[in-house]
Amino acid sequence: MTDTTIHTQATRTPLGVRAAVRTVAARAASDAVRRELEDASPAETVRALARAGLGALRVPVSFGGAGGTVGDLGELLVEVAAADSNLTQIVRGHLGFVEFLLARPAEPVRDELLRAAGRGELFGPAASVHAGGVGGSAPATTIIDTSTWLDRAEGVRLSGEKYYTTGSLYSEWINVLVIEDGAVFEVVVRSDDPGVTIIDDWDGIGQRATASGTTRFDRVEVRVGHVLAYDVPRLSERLGAFYQFVHSATQAGILRRASDDLADVVRARRRSYPLATEPLPGHDPQVLQVVGEVESAAFGAAANVDAVARAFDRIAGAEDAGGLDRVVLASAAAQVRNTALAGEGLWRLFDAASASAVVRGAALDRHWRNARTISSHNPVVYKARLLGDHAVNGTLPDGSI
């Protein structure tokens, strides 16, 4: 099945998208180590995933999508992250913006953008600012500020700078978070519009290929109606839980691939250690215990993702405040547990893999670096505190991501 044939109306069902995405993910998995070692761009694979329908999975059938559930998406994200966790991080912003559109009432611009997603076009996020400040200004004190603005003197023009614009380099559109008169808006522009400059200056220890760097906007002309307000009740809370859900799915995928890699490493080992109870590591009960612990961590992380997805699907468009509270709490709990599972499991991996597994060519360290980077985007200590405050004092989440 080639990339030119997998994008058809026949595949615009959850099962069809899953089959097409799995084909692309299998190729990505076989080449992931090479891309990591060579810092090679995943752009071709990202486009193949878009053609396969990953970004259209949650888009309604009437707009060219597959009309899939959050559960469908979660299962697929774990598989794609197991192939290469850069890929799920790249599309995270797109998936969240689709949820933003789905939560809004029908309107021409919303419908136009959903049709674009249904065609396989991708949206990249531009919300946060660099901690060091913009253009020599004072260091930022919040992750979202007013350093990006709209000039409405002649039409609407967008200016400013954002950081952590993950996936924008690979996207046709960019949705830019702007604060104006205390209100929050998503301003949607094309990535190739005059005045848009995307800089691949991300230098994190993990998720190296996500292009999570700077995007600048220099008086970019904004199309009529492409300024969308956050005016749906509790939308920020819902989106915050969803964005974290994608992170948790990525962690689960990292653990899945790490567990599979560890089994391969132990299976191939022929040299044991003087203190070992068996001459072959593959029969050593202590080594097998470690392999089993990492396998168990991968299972648990995926189960947590599934639990959050089912919580989302239970409220599917319903105005159920209690249901949304449960979603937000479930997403926070999954983050806390998956961060712990990934941290312990990916450290323990090397107890069974032996010293020869630390060679750079094996690239096993990417699993820990990628999981640690994912965990750092939304500091887990705050989510644990949120859960504790709710358990003890009944305090509800405040909507922050």
Image (cartoon, helix red, strand yellow):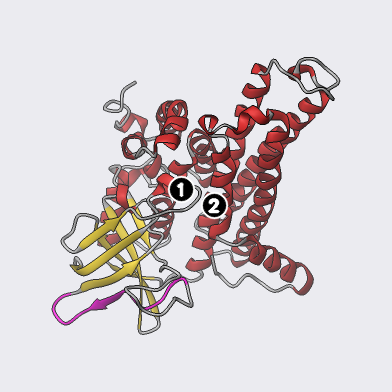
Give the quarter of the figure containing the N terminus.
Answer: top left
Q: What's the residue at 44%, 55% (across, down)?
A: 96
> Which mark, by number, is residue 326?
none
- Is 259 placed left or right of 106 in the picture? right
Q: What's the residue at 15%, 75% (across, down)?
A: 155
Residue 358 image point, x, y percent: 61, 33
Mark 1 and mark 2 in contact (Cβ < 8 Å)?
A: yes
Stretch in magenta:
143-155
* Towards the viewer: 102 or 304: 304
Residue 299 image point, x, y percent: 68, 36
* Towards the viewer: 211 or 313: 211
Q: Quadrant of residue 291?
A: top right
Residue 338 image point, x, y percent: 65, 48
Residue indicated by mark 2: 374
| Residue 15 seen in render | no
Residue 308 image point, x, y percent: 61, 50
- Would you call the spot at circle 2 few (<14 residues within 10 Å), some (14-19), or many (20 or more)? many
User: Magenta residues: mostly which secondary structure?
Assistant: loop
Specify the farthest residue to the front: 274
Residue indicated by mark 1: 89
Q: What's the residue at 44%, 35% (across, down)?
A: 37
Q: Secondary structure at mark 2?
A: helix
